[in-house]
Amino acid sequence: MEAILFVAIFIGGSYLYYAAKQRAKRKVFFKHQYDSQRSLTHRNLVITTTADIKDVRRSLDRHVVSDDSARAVFFGGAIKVQNRSDLRTVYQHSSKITSGGDGDHFSASITFRPPKDDHLSAVISIDQWREKDGVTRRAGIKAMQQFMDSVVAAFRAADPNIQIKYTPAA
């Protein structure tokens, strides 16, 4: 009976420790970092343009450069097109060497909506990302922000008069 009680207290204490640690990192120690992460991962960027989808895709290929070199993978991270269809492109970012191990990685997607009234619309989202104790490392957040900035630059290169808005992520 005492052994069962000890195990139950140990498991309960471990759970409480983990929950308190995760909450403290999000709310106290890494609050700014967590807020930056949420602004990227918990809302979608919606861009509306009058440019043709082919022009936008060409511009994306120039601005969101796929770097497969070993240096990029190990030191600076690499972004690759993981999957491409007519109306959706999925990008994968990965970096193997980090202080926390496991690397920084995220996947993002650009989903084009069929054009209406000569306006093409695209939803850009960060779909998956790596966290440790509920918070993404600064390097991972920086890579996500650079990706979003590159996508906006690509759309602006195709059409300087884009419209940008944010919607909550699903």
Image (cartoon, rainbow, N blue to C red):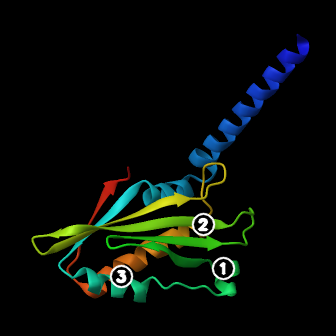
Q: Which residue is mark 3?
A: 153
54 left or right of 71?
A: left
Q: Amino acid at mark 2?
A: His
Residue at the image point whose x is 69% and y is 85% from the top: 70
Residue 36 position within the rendered picture, expressed as x and y whole percent measured from the top left: 49, 60
Q: Say whether disc 1 or disc 2 marks the residue closer to the N-terminus.
A: 1
Q: Nearer the viewer, residue 159 or 90?
A: 90
Q: Residues within 10 Å of mark 1 (few under 14, many from 20)?
A: some
Q: Amino acid at mark 1?
A: Val
Q: Alpha-carbon distance for marks 3 and 1?
A: 23 Å
Q: Residue furthest top?
A: 1
Q: Say whether disc 3 or disc 1 marks the residue closer to the N-terminus.
A: 1
Residue at the image point whose x is 48% and y is 72% from the top: 91
Q: Residue furthest front?
A: 85
Residue 60 to residue 145: above or below:
below
Q: Alpha-carbon distance for marks 1 and 2?
A: 11 Å
Which label sits on residue 73?
1
Looking at the rendered structure, the secondary structure element under dot 2 is strand
Q: Which residue is mark 2?
A: 105
Quadrant location of the N terminus in the rendered image:
top right
